[in-house]
Amino acid sequence: MFSVLNLQSLLGLAVIVAACWGLSENRRAFPWRLALGAIAVQAALVMVLFGIPGSEVVLTAITGAVDGLTRASAAGAQFVFGYLAGGDQPYSVENPPALFTFAFNVLPMILVISALSALLWHWKILKWITHGFGLLFQRTMGLGGASALAVAANIFLGMVESPIVIRAYLDKLTRSELFLMMVVGLATVAGSTMVAYAAILAPVMQNAAGHVLVASIVSAPAGVLLARIMIPETAGEGGAGADYASALKYDSAIDAIVKGTADGLMVVLNISAVLIVFVALMALINVMLGGFWLFDGPVTIERLLGWVFMPVAWLSGVEWAEAGKAGWLLGVKLTQTEFKAFIELGAVPAGEMSERTRMLMTYALCGFANIGSVGITVTGLSVLMPERREEVLGMVWKALFGGFLATLMTAAIVGAMPAAMFR
């Protein structure tokens, strides 16, 4: 049965598409076929994991895999860091939850998943999954082979690693295709961080791992659609083909593990540095705003962003009574990364937020679209294609807007579906 909240999400979907159309470089070239195809692909992907009979088995398997990876990562972290990572405590503990630390309990998991992803790529398991999604996007949304492969790679590898997969074709991409790759990179997350997000939400959310996985996959076609609306492809251009046999390569399984670990270390260091800096900057701004008082409390950047994003959260399908909290989480994501936002979402007790709002926020937060990622995008693409650096700089803030709205579009798609599907 459909409710007012479902219609509310449909309204949000229309507003998101209209906002991107308003910023389009060619409003007459609205991609109607792509719009219908992208929304159909999104709805179908959600239904495959949550709506078909027997989907509970798949979700249980995903949750079990995440739990196993979490325990394995904890074993490795405890061997190196001991009681700091949750090992045997040398002192009596009066507040066990306080032992959880992001650096020792979450970041090591990224190292393990990064190494495992490289190994699965070397064994061609992850490669064929990526190619399968690439062909799906190529057939259903009319993307060129190189663009389709980059979009699929973004789902599992991340916004910096995915261009490496099609490095030989970067100079052949049109402006529209390059922008599309940037938007999708900001709309999705890497496989190495998916497991960390799921582990953070698991204590307060049922099927957290399944929702996080679906969130990153479903946001890819949303990013494609919004990117093509904002910078449409010129007729007769684009469609660069790609040899699906050429991609990242490792010399051996050991080489894959070692290089995957090294790549994971760079991700860990980058996440740590960005979190430290941006959380500190937000704290500094709050100190500067500390002398101002508004309504029932001091003015903070979090409160301001919460008010700004309240209608945005409402349009995704959140009830107005919880739109303030949801809007605040969206503000945290934009300014302090989605990692901080997921930590805050996981810290909200189960009884203080409805299951619907928590689920929709999981989808809305699951993307790299934050201010810190702007620098990462520019740096990564500048290394791979220095001759197009100015072009990247000219589109990156527009790409941030598109990537941010893509995850909200995904939340709206989920919010428009019957609630019974997710039970």
Image (tube, rainbow, N blue to C red):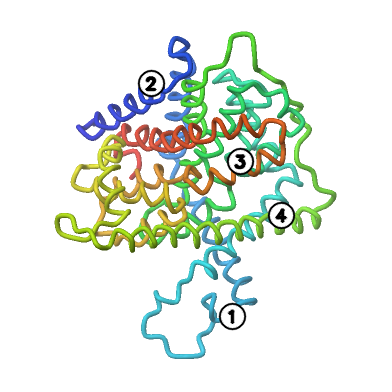
Q: The residue under label 1 is which amino acid type?
A: Gly
Left or right: where 14 falls relative to 169: left
Q: In this view, does 376 lie above or below 142?
A: below
Q: Is residue 362 above or below residue 196?
A: above
Query: How far, Cα to Cα, is label 2 from label 1?
Result: 54 Å
- CB within 8 Å, label 4 to label 2: no
Query: How far, Cα to Cα, is label 3 from label 1?
Result: 38 Å
Which residue does the numbered mark 3 point to in the structure image? 378
Name the residue located 66 percent from the left edge and 18 percent from the top edge.
Answer: 239
Query: How far, Cα to Cα, is label 4 from label 2?
Result: 41 Å
| Front label number (3 vs 1) | 3
- CB within 8 Å, label 2 to label 1: no
Which residue does the numbered mark 4 point to in the structure image? 260
Q: Which numbered disc flags the more N-terminal residue, 2 or 1? A: 2
Q: What crowding class fits label 3: few (fewer than 14 Cα within 10 Å), some (14-19), or many (20 or more)?
A: many
Which residue does the numbered mark 2 point to in the structure image? 22
Name the residue located 61 percent from the left edge and 41 percent from the top edge.
Answer: 378
Measured from the top left, where is residue 197 in percent x and y?
Answer: 48, 54
Indicate the quadrant containing the C terminus: top left, top right, bottom left or bottom right. Answer: top left
Relative depth, front residue between 376 and 257: 376
Q: The residue under label 3 is which amino acid type?
A: Val
Relative depth, front residue between 89 and 388: 388
